[in-house]
Amino acid sequence: MAARTLLRYIELKSGYADNGPAWIAHVRTSKSGTQIYFNGKALQRGEGSRHFDIEAGEIYWVSGIKKNGADRHWAGGGKVSIEKGAVAAYLALVGETALDRARFVVVDDLPRADIARFHVLANTSYLDETFASRCATDAAAEAL
């Protein structure tokens, strides 16, 4: 699968019930589709629509845009921030001509993630774990 840019609903779940900060924004996916890059973060897919920030560990809900406009959980509340650059695509998707200002606030486009930095971070973590494991195995062998 090639990396893609998609329009998604993202909501911070850590520290909140169903009323955490929420965004409608363009995200970029990894080639495998297991990570999305959003607001300067790399979010790793977990179970279902749950994702976690690979640096901070925070949990996010990430889903496609609902055509009926009911992206927030029914028990949740609060305005959803929508990137200025995503407004036209969102309106076309839901078949509207204007945003409901009672539900949305338009924000500047969010910072793009430095994907190369996350690749280095992921590979460094893997190499560090592999190196630590190898050292432990070598130390155990020398003890014999």
Image: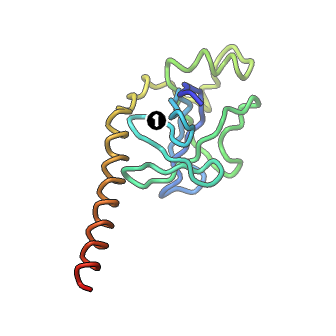
Q: Position of residue 125 (x, y in %)?
A: 33, 53
Q: Decide: is 98 above or below 121.
A: above
Front-most of 42 and 74?
Answer: 42
Q: Secondary structure at mark 1?
A: strand
Q: Is residue 83 left or right of residue 49?
A: left
Front-most of 62 and 34?
Answer: 34
Front-most of 17 and 119?
Answer: 119
Q: Quadrant of residue 32?
A: top right
Q: Decide: is 135 above or below 58.
A: below
Q: Quadrant of residue 138?
A: bottom left
Write the residue at 33% across / 60% down: 129
In the rendered image, the residue lying farthest to the bottom is 144
Q: Decide: is 74 above or below 23.
A: below
Q: Is residue 47 left or right of residue 53?
A: right
Q: Which residue is mark 1?
A: 37
Q: Position of residue 42 (x, y in %)?
A: 43, 41
Q: Position of residue 21 (x, y in %)?
A: 50, 43
Total numbered labels placed on residues in the image: 1
Write the residue at 60% across / 31% down: 1
Q: Is residue 69 left or right of residue 16?
A: right
Q: How is the image coloured?
A: rainbow
Q: Position of residue 68 (x, y in %)?
A: 76, 31
Write the residue at 38% across / 52% down: 56
Instruction: Specify few, some or many for label 1: CA neighbours under 10 Å numbering under 14, 14-19, or 20 or more.
Output: many
Q: Quadrant of the C terminus?
A: bottom left
Amino acid type indicated by mark 1: Tyr
Write the residue at 38% across / 28% down: 111
